[in-house]
Amino acid sequence: MHAGVRSPLLVTAVLGLTAVGCTATATRAPGARPPTATSATPTATATPTPAPTSAVDKDSYQVGTCLDITREIEEVRCDQPHTHEVMLAQRQEQKRKPSRRLMDRACWGVLPRYLSTTEEAASRLEPALLGPWKGDDGKWRFACLATERGSDGEPVRRMRKLAGALSRGLGPYRRCLTGEPLADGPQNVVPCGESHRSEAIGVLPIKDFPAARDGLWKVASRAGEQCEAMAESYLGGKRRGVRSSGIVPLREQWLGGQKTGTCYVVSKTPVQGVMR
């Protein structure tokens, strides 16, 4: 059995507010990258499958299990350095291999419950996918993992669990970017205490996504207005040199389980610490 760790695929549309409204373009999300020890470049494609280890070659994982995936996939105690935590261990009753959409939907769906929040998209805490692989009974399995993105783009090695980490708000896990949330190239995600220009301020539920050709524009326009209002509330009014922006999923990703957009405030010049 071989299992690889990857990020659930996320492609987004970016909306940037201007004096005359907002525009939307298709691009990659800042966080769409595979959290593996061997990956150096952000990407939204599947990662090479790591060589199987004794920790991978097992029938299943228990929810809450901690894994250190730096050189290989190793199961460790959660008070020891680790990079990922198991949020969901799923066995498929069907004989066919589970689709990527099914697995992505499961991982995006379990993340807010595991973190105790509805604002996970505004944090540096992300889902990752382990598998799929066949168990001893011949049935397909996969696991959804939680991980924290570090300023180097790699998963942070932690010594505490992430379960319930956002129950009291985003706190130190707020998602900040060194540039703007355009993500048509590598985009550094950093803690907000480090130099950054953009910081996530909240998420927007996207309850419907029209199938018509202008569906993306309608979703982005609606989100643009909401992000502008959210930014004024976050900043305590309008602020010179700071504007609102945000990302929304494409319809394919919305159907795959990504049901929220993320609003940001963007500064013309780098700042340290949150802008509120």
Image: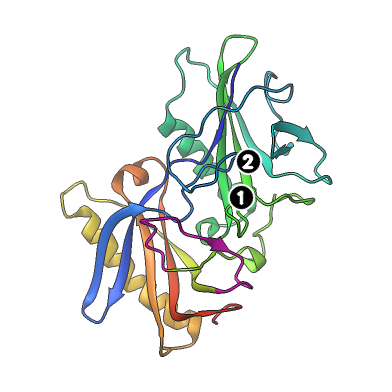
Residue 140 at what x, y percent from top left? 54, 18
Q: Quarter holding the N terminus? A: top right
Picture quadrant where residue 61 is located? top right
Q: Is 219 or 154 nearer to us in this picture? A: 154
At horizontal 49% and vertical 47% (from top left) the residue drawn is 41
Q: Is residue 60 left or right of residue 244?
A: right
**Is label 2 in a helix, a strand or a loop?**
loop
Q: Is 40 or 236 nearer to us in this picture? A: 40
Residue 145 at what x, y percent from top left? 62, 40
Give residue 154's mark.
1
For the magenta stretch, what is the residue range?
Answer: 180-195
Q: Is 60 or 114 nearer to us in this picture? A: 60
Label pair 2/1, CB-CB below 8 angstroms: yes
Residue 256 at what x, y percent from top left? 39, 40
The secondary structure that dominates the magenta segment is loop
Q: Quarter holding the C terminus? A: bottom right
Give residue 39's mark.
none
**Vertical relation: 263 (above or below) 6:** below
**Is label 1 in a helix, a strand or a loop?**
loop
Instruction: Give yes or no for residue 183 being in the magenta stretch.
Output: yes
Q: Which residue is mark 2?
A: 37
Picture quadrant where residue 186 is located? bottom left
The residues tagged by marks 2 and 1 sit, at their Cα atoms, a distance apart of 7 Å
Residue 204 at what x, y percent from top left? 42, 62
Amino acid tagged 1: Glu
How many residues crowd mark 2 within 10 Å: few (<14), some (14–19), many (20+)?
some
**Vertical relation: 147 (above or below) 188:** above
At horizontal 57% and vertical 74% (from top left) the residue drawn is 195
